[in-house]
Image (cartoon, helix red, strand yellow):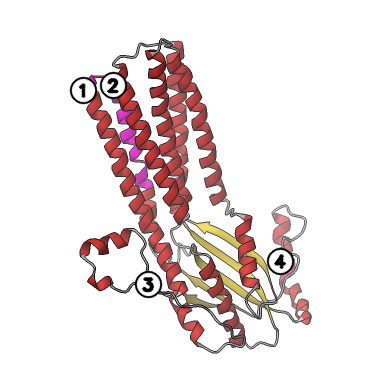
Amino acid sequence: MREHRHDEHADDHSGRHEYDHEHDHNHDHPHDQEHDSSFWRQLRELIPFGHSHSHAEMNIDAALEGSKRGTWALKISLIGLGATALIQLIVVIISGSVGLLADTIHNFSDALTAVPLWIAFSLARRPANRRYTYGYGRAEDVAGLFIVLMIFLSSAVAAYESVQKLLNPQPITNLWWVAVAALVGFLGNEGVAVFRIRVGSEIGSAALVADGLHARADGFTSLAVLLGVLGVAFGFPMADPIVGILITIAILFVLKDAVVTMWHRLMDAVEPDLVDTIEQVASQVPGIRSVHNVQVRWIGHKLSASLHAVVPAQLSVGGSHNLIQEVRHALFHRLPHLAEITVHADPDDKSAAELDSLTAHHEQSGMMEQGQGEPIHTHRHPDITGYSISVH
């Protein structure tokens, strides 16, 4: 097994191939960076702009830019939530409402939940080492669990306050001031939610999406206050606790989405279409007989994958290497979030099946220990060579 870094990938195409075919490397990008002002250079560090790189280098850039963009999104959203809470604080000072003060403090504290995710994005940029051989990308998923817990606490607090208002009704004072603060809280939190979810989806960060759902849950809490105030203003005082209970139910649906998202990440689940895409792209490389044993998972906001590709048995090790490099090239080009790929070359010689007995019983034993009656992969080929890459 030989290890290759991403930056070696560009050089692999200059060598001779036993299966030659053309690739479109004509990617034109502006090259006037040296003339940019310092402002634009700093802005480019936060928002992805075009650069001229090989496909492998572009995937490294995408992974690093993902962490930078995630951090940038957290900074912007923190400013948004801070401004929301500040406006609410001004309303509190003007109105003197104790209830609004509690809601404002709640919004300030919720804004701080972005800190663990910020730390996670910073950790994710650290290189892998002999202890953390896959790097620190999983720190995002740990932060995501914390965020899910905070959404649960938000729903619990909303439910408790609604029940208390239902059992012990209290008059709402400064109705219109409360309505203004609630509207500001809803719009601010929902704006941050949309922003975080959009950026999280673009960079592949489940934790950032979950943090966006957390902001949405807080926005629902403010919406409950607004609707309750309107109900009281129109002569229906029980609207406040009733709306609060309904909003709590809505928050539980938000919680469900966040839990499912993080569960999938922790269990290494991916969309089946992604596996289909990898199989299709790899199989279309000239010289590849078939593809099997495809495995994909997210590590933070980066994809890690492995597969077995069946190649002609008469190929030399060098020829197999070149062919495998073509598979890697095609996958990196097709999947922007792909940061690590291991491809094993298996010969198509039928006589090689006899060597399966060397490892088949170990694999079947492992499957039986996991409670499965038969191995997941029913056809295997002995490895003659393998190539792996890793992002640092």
Closest to the camera, between mark 4 and mark 3, is 3
**Disc number placed over residue 177 in the picture, else none:** 2
Name the residue tied to disc 1: 94
- Whole-angstrom CA distance, mark 1 to mark 3, is 54 Å
Task: Name the amino acid type tagged 2.
Answer: Trp
Mark 2 vs 1: CB contact within 8 A: yes
Q: Quadrant of residue 237?
A: top left
- Whole-angstrom CA distance, mark 3 to mark 2, is 52 Å
User: Crowding at label 1, few (<14), some or many (≥20) Cα neighbours within 10 Å?
Assistant: few
Residue 143 visible to an observer of this rendering: no
Instruction: For mark 2, give the secondary structure.
Output: helix
Instruction: For mark 1, give the secondary structure.
Output: helix
Q: Is the magenta region chiefly helix, strand or loop?
A: helix
- Whole-angstrom CA distance, mark 4 to mark 3, is 51 Å
Task: Name the amino acid type tagged 1.
Answer: Ile
Task: Name the amino acid type tagged 3.
Answer: His
The percent position of residue 282, horizontal first and vertical second, equals: 62, 71
Residue 245 visible to an observer of this rendering: yes
Mark 4 vs 3: CB contact within 8 A: no
Drawn side of residue 93 relative to residue 130, left or right:
left
Task: Name the amino acid type tagged 4.
Answer: His
Which corner quadrant holds the C terminus? bottom left
